[in-house]
Amino acid sequence: MGSGGEGEETTVPLLERKPAVVYSKGCPGCAIDRKKAECTGIPYMLFFHIWIINLVSSLPILSIYPFLYFMIKDLHISKKVEDIGFFAGLVGASYMLGRALTSIFWGVVADRIGRKPVIMSVFFI
C-alpha cells in the first residue's frame, strides 16, 4: 500500500503558498529586491545608463589630445617639431597612469564617506 496505490491521498499540496515578503521603508536592499520582483524583462534602460557613463568617462582623455600639440609647442617643451608627438603621448599616458593609480584610493574613500562628498571634494579642492 505504501507504493502509491489507488485510493491514497497525498497530504503535501502541489502549490505551496510562500509567505509574503516584507519590505522596510528606506532600505536600499529592499528597494533593489522590490525592483527585481517587479521587472522581469531585459533592463534596457540600465544598459543605456551604463553606456552613457562609459561614454562620459572616456571624454576627458579624448578631449585632451587636440590641444596637446599646441600646448607642447607653445611651452617649448620639445627642441624639435618631430618630438612633439613623443611628448603628447607621454602626457596622455601619464594621465591614464594617474587614473589607474588613484582610482582604487578614490573608490575606497567613496565607500567610506559616500559618493557625493567625494565628487564634491574634487570640485572644491
Image (cartoon, grey):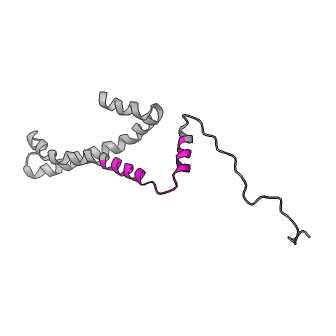
Is the C terminus in the top left, top right, bottom left or bottom right quadrant? top left
Q: Is residue 102 visible?
A: yes
39 to the left or right of 99: right
Compared to residue 50, the image places residue 120 above or below, namely: above
44 inside magenta stretch: yes
Compared to residue 74, the image places residue 2 above or below, namely: below
Is the N terminus in the top left, top right, bottom left or bottom right quadrant? bottom right
Q: How many marks?
A: 0
Q: Quadrant of residue 60?
A: top left
Residue at image position (32%, 32%) is 122
Compared to residue 1, the image places residue 49 above or below, namely: above
User: Depth check: 49 or 6 in front?
Assistant: 6
**Residue most extreme to the top:** 124
Q: Is residue 125 visible?
A: no
117 to the left or right of 69: right
From the top left corner, tell me how far across and down residue 2 is, in percent.
Answer: 90, 68
Residue at image position (38%, 41%) is 103
Residue at image position (87%, 66%) is 8
Q: Quadrant of residue 27?
A: top right
From the top left corner, tell me how far across and down residue 62 is, in percent.
Answer: 23, 49
User: Depth check: 58 or 14 in front?
Assistant: 14
Q: Which residues are magenta?
A: 31-55
42 to the left or right of 59: right
34 inside magenta stretch: yes
Q: Main secondary structure of the magenta part?
A: helix
Residue at image position (30%, 27%) is 124
User: Depth check: 84 or 116 in front?
Assistant: 116
